[in-house]
């Protein structure tokens, strides 16, 4: 499974200032770029290339597009910054929808009740403290729900699924051998007979 760090970002930086009081729509290009959202409800379409997206607070919709993208749905960045190193990657808030689409993506929902879909590719996905719905999509994925009562569905191949704290439901029925660790809480795992489970209070095998 790919655990790669994002490649060096080439191309331009798309900046939407964090002080804007209303949501924005931003469309990237087919080059690799860094895109900053606002603290309101944004729609961000990264398109092609290896992109890095900091969506900030607000109830955002973020679509990765082709290429291996890194998406932080609830980052907190100083107003007007163009430096990703100055951003706190999980400090914002908002109920976000993140779609990785194709490519090997790194996706983080952050705070709030988020819906995160990896799409095709080998994805690394994190939820956050809210009650998240997370889907891996196709290929080998690694998913960590973190806090909250999450609903996690693996991809179509061998996945590593970790619920974290909270009362989680993990669905791993895909005819592939998955590793499922439900974590603390009162959890349910719906799995294939060959899957490996740990710390799951209720295991339903089929």
Image (cartoon, helix red, strand yellow):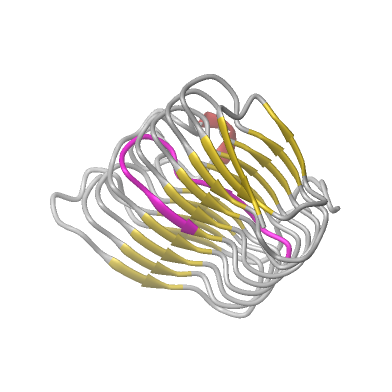
* Residue 150 locus on image (x, y percent): 43, 40
Along the line of sight, the residue nearer the viewer: 63 or 150? 150
Q: Is residue 22 left or right of residue 192?
A: left
Q: Residue furthest top?
A: 184
Q: Quadrant of residue 12?
A: bottom right
Along the line of sight, the residue nearer the viewer: 157 or 35? 157
Along the line of sight, the residue nearer the viewer: 128 or 65? 128
Q: Residue at x 59, y 33 (%)?
A: 85
Q: Residue furthest right?
A: 1
Q: Is residue 65 left or right of residue 205?
A: left
Q: Is residue 45 positioned above or below 135 on the image?
A: below
Q: Is residue 114 magenta?
A: yes
Secondary structure mainly formed by the magenta segment:
loop
User: Considering the image in quadrants, where does the C terminus appear?
Assistant: bottom right
Q: Quadrant of residue 199?
A: top right
Q: Is residue 12 positioned above or below 75 on the image?
A: below
* Residue 195 locus on image (x, y percent): 78, 48
Give the magenta range: 104-116
Q: Is residue 129 left or right of residue 94?
A: right
Q: Is residue 146 magenta?
A: no
Q: Is residue 53 left or right of residue 15?
A: right
Q: Residue furthest left?
A: 21
* Residue 108 locus on image (x, y percent): 53, 44
Q: Residue at x 83, y 54 (%)?
A: 177
Q: Quadrant of residue 47?
A: bottom right
Q: How many marks?
A: 0
* Residue 187 locus on image (x, y percent): 50, 32
Q: Residue at x 82, y 46 (%)?
A: 3
């Amino acid at each position: 499974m790919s655990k790669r760090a994002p490649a060096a970002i080439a191309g331009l930086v798309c900046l939407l200032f964090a002080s804007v009081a209303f949501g924005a729509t931003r469309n990237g290009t087919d080059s690799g770029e860094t895109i900053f959202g606002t603290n309101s409800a944004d729609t961000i379409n990264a398109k092609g290339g290896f992109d890095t997206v900091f969506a900030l607070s607000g109830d955002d919709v973020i679509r990765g597009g082709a290429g291996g993208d890194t998406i932080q749905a609830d980052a907190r960045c100083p107003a007007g910054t163009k430096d990703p190193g100055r951003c706190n990657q999980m400090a914002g808030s908002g109920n976000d929808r993140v779609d990785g689409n194709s490519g090997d993506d790194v996706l983080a929902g952050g705070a709030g009740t988020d819906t995160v879909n990896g799409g095709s590719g080998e994805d690394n996905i994190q939820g956050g403290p809210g009650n998240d719905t997370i889907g891996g999509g196709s290929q080998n994925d690694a998913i960590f729900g973190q806090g909250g009562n999450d609903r996690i569905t693996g991809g179509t191949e061998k996945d590593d699924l970790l619920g974290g704290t909270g009362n989680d439901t993990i669905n791993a029925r895909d005819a592939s051998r998955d590793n499922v660790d439900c974590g603390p809480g009162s959890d349910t795992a719906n799995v294939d007979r060959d899957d490996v489970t740990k710390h799951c209070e209720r295991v339903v095998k089929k």
